[in-house]
Amino acid sequence: MAGAVLLVSLLLISCLAASCHGATLSSVQKTLIVTASPKNGQVLKAGEDSRNLTWSFNNSFLAMTDSAYKTLQVKLCYAPISQQDRAWRKTEDNLVRDKTCQHKIVAKPYRSSHNNFTWKVQRDVPTGTYFVRAYAYNAADEEVAYGQTTDANKTTYLFQVEAISGRHVSLDITSICFSAFAVMSLFGFFLLEKRRTKNSQEK
């Protein structure tokens, strides 16, 4: 029992340490340029539509600034309007606790330029307003740089995603066909029983 308590305590301490010492967005340099086209106002259908994404190192910074960048992740992030009254999407400066960007789009080795990716909206993305953010990581898998398609206040170049509805056309067709088959089977059974009853009466 004491061993289990000790183990739980160590896990809690390690989790708290991670959350306390994780990188913060305010301390990470915004050295990446990220774009998505079309740029603004488009409504994308989950599971169907796509966006073309590009990212590169901002050459206004010194040439060796990105020397520690090893990998890069591009993520789909909730805009403030889609975070209201939703604590599970809350923005935190500490990136360990931050819940702004919950959907990973792609992960790649870092390259300073000529990066592009055609992203098809995943089927499980909920209805909402979004932007795209990219994080660069060092060899220790720590966030060391970022960039995003919107401004600091997250109000420009936003786009909407329309989630897949609860019913699907193919499911509706299947349901109709099954119902028709059931009615026809019931009608056939009724005729068969009627014929059997008539034959019994004639005998």
Image (tube, helix red, strand yellow):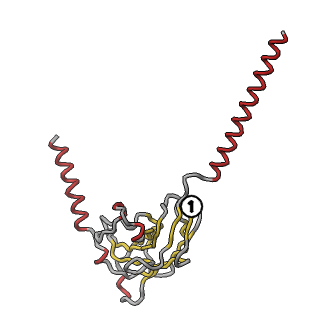
How far from the left and from the top, in percent, is residue 142?
A: 32, 70
Q: Nearest the camera: 99 or 56?
A: 99
The quadrant in which residue 57 appears is: bottom left
Identify the secondary structure beneath mark 1. loop
Residue occupying the point 35% across, 77% down: 145
Residue reaching furthest left?
2
Residue occupying the point 46% across, 81% down: 56
Left or right of 46? Residue 151 is: left
Residue occupying the point 38% across, 77% down: 146
Q: Amino acid at mark 1?
A: Gly
Residue occupying the point 37% across, 79% down: 153
Q: Nearest the camera: 38 or 80?
A: 80
Residue reaching furthest top?
203
Quadrant of the rendering where the C terminus is positioned: top right
How far from the left and from the top, in percent, is residue 26?
A: 29, 77
Q: Nearest the camera: 19 or 167?
A: 167
Q: Which residue is mark 1?
A: 47
How far from the left and from the top, in percent, is residue 192?
A: 77, 23
